Image: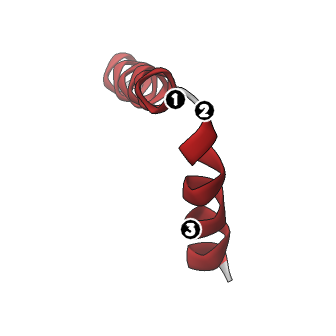
Amino acid sequence: MIAGYYRAKNLDLSGIDKEKYYMEQYKKKINEIYELAFSL
């Protein structure tokens, strides 16, 4: 179910600026890592 959801999202991205999308995902991941590191 979840895999299909992500696959559909990726298909929807074909008309969108993929680099911008991936940068947003990357920034979110980096922020999560920093928050985890500082919480230790």
Crowding around mark 3 (Cα neighbors within 10 Å: few <14, some 14 to 19, many 20+) is few
Q: Residue at x 42, y 19 (%)?
A: 27
Q: Quadrant of residue 16?
A: top right
- Residue at x-position 55% and y-position 55%: 10
Question: Mark 1 is on which residue type?
Answer: Tyr
Residue 16 image label: 2
| Residue 24 drawn at (x, y percent) | 50, 23
Q: Earlier in the sequence, mark 2 or mark 3?
A: 3
Can you say which quadrant of the picture contains the C terminus?
top left
Distance, label 2 to label 3, CA atoms, is: 15 Å
Q: On screen, 31 above or below 16?
A: above
Residue 5 at x, y = what percent? 67, 69
How many marks can you see? 3
Q: Give the left or right position of residue 1, taking residue 7 as reference.
A: right
Can you identify the residue that label 3 sits on?
A: 7
Q: Nearer the viewer, residue 10 or 28?
A: 10
Whether pointer 1 and pointer 2 mark residues with C-beta atoms closer than 8 Å, the reply is yes
Tell me if residue 7 comes above or below residue 39 in the rendering.
below
Secondary structure category for the residue under label 1: helix
Which of the two residues, 33 or 28, is positioned nearer the viewer here? 28
Residue farthest bottom in this picture:
1
Query: Which residue is label 1 attached to?
Result: 21
Q: Amino acid at mark 3?
A: Arg
